[in-house]
Image (tube, helix red, strand yellow):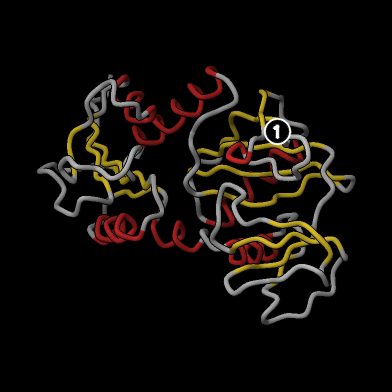
Amino acid sequence: MPEGKTVVLLTSPKHPPRSGPPSAFYERGRGNILAERLLDVGHRVAMWWDHPEGPLLPCDPDVVLVRSSIHPLLERADEFAAKGLTVMNEPEMHRASQDKLFQAHAFFTHGVAHPQSIDPFLTQWDGPSEVVVKPRSGRSGIGVRRGHANALEVKEGEMMQAFVEAVQDFRVTVVDGRDLGWALRTAKAGDFRTNLAQGATMVHAPPPSSQARDLVRLACASLGLRIAGVDVVISEHGPIVLEVNAVTTLVGPDENSTREILDAVCTLVAQS
C-alpha cells in the first residue's frame, strides 16, 4: 500500500465556539466522517479550525482540503496554494463560486442548462413572471422566496431567477469528474424548497439520464471545482442545474453512497 499523506482539513467547528487549540491532529471518534475515512486508508489528518486564532500545528502537509467558506480559512488556503501545495478546491475558484450570479455567468459561458438569472439592480427582468429571489451567497434555502416578478421585493445582495417547475429534484456529489450518490429530494408539505435544512427528505435514486450525468460534471468543471454538490432538476425540457455547492457535506442518501463519496475523495488525495 502506498505511504499515506498528511492532509490538512480547513474546517469550522462542529459545535462552535471552540475552546481548544486552533489546530490538532484528528482523533478518532470526534465525528468528522471525512477525517475518519482518511485515517482508515492510512492518511494523517490535521484539523485547522477558523477559531480560535492561531498557527497550524507543526506538520508538513501534502494536500489541503477546503471544508469551509469562512474568510480566515480561505485566506489560509490562499497561503498554502501560494506555496505550491495541492489545495482542493482551488481557493480562487472556491471563493468565486460562492456567488450564485457568478455561477450563472459561468454556466451560460460553458453551455450548462440553468434558469435565467439576473442582478435586478443592474438588469431589468424580461423572463417568465414566476420567479425565485435568493441571496447571491446564501445556502440551505435560507432567504429564498418564490412569487411574481413584480410582487417580490429584492434586497441588495440578492438575485432573481426564473422558477423551474421540476418533475424530479436531485442532489448529487461530484468528485474529480465522477458523479456519485444521486439522491431524489422531496420538499416538505407546503414548501417549494428541497433543501434538507428546510425539512426536505432524500432517498437513493439512479441517475435519471446520461444527459443529466454529463450536465452535473460539466457544471463543476465550468466552475473549476473538483469536489462539489450539485442541485439539478428534471424539467419538461430536460435536466437543469440550479446551483453548485463547493462545501458539500459528502453525505449521500444512504450509507453505501456516503462510503462511495468518501472513498472517491480519498482516492483523489492519494493521487494528488
Report the residue at 58% width, 31% height from top. Answer: 180
Where does the image place residue 110, in percent across and percent down from the top left?
A: 67, 60
Q: Quadrant of residue 217?
A: top right
Q: Which is nearer the eye, 102 or 212?
A: 102
Q: Which is nearer the eye, 21 or 258?
A: 21
**Amino acid found under the numbered disc labelled 1:** Arg
Q: Where is 101 relative to 69, above or below?
A: below
Where does the image place residue 42, in percent across and percent down from the top left?
A: 26, 22
Report the residue at 72% width, 71% height from top. Answer: 153
Q: Where is 264 relative to 12, above or below?
A: above
Q: Which is nearer the eye, 66 or 80?
A: 66
Residue hosting label 1: 185
Where does the image place residue 113, in percent across and percent down from the top left?
A: 75, 54
Q: Where is 44 relative to 74, above or below?
A: above
Q: Which quarter of the image is occupied by the N terminus? A: top left
Q: Would you say 230 lies left or right of 50 here?
A: right
Report the residue at 77% width, 35% height from top. Answer: 189
Q: Would you say 222 lies left or right of 235 here?
A: left
Q: Would you say 209 lies left or right of 229 here?
A: right
> The residue tagged with tag 1: helix, strand or loop?
strand
How many tags in the picture? 1
Q: Which quarter of the image is occupied by the C terminus? A: top left
Q: In which quarter of the image is residue 163?
A: bottom right
Dot 1 alpha-carbon crowd within 10 angstroms: few under 14, some 14 to 19, many 20 or more: many
Report the residue at 78% width, 40% height from top. Answer: 190
The residue positioned farthest toward the left in the image shown: 58
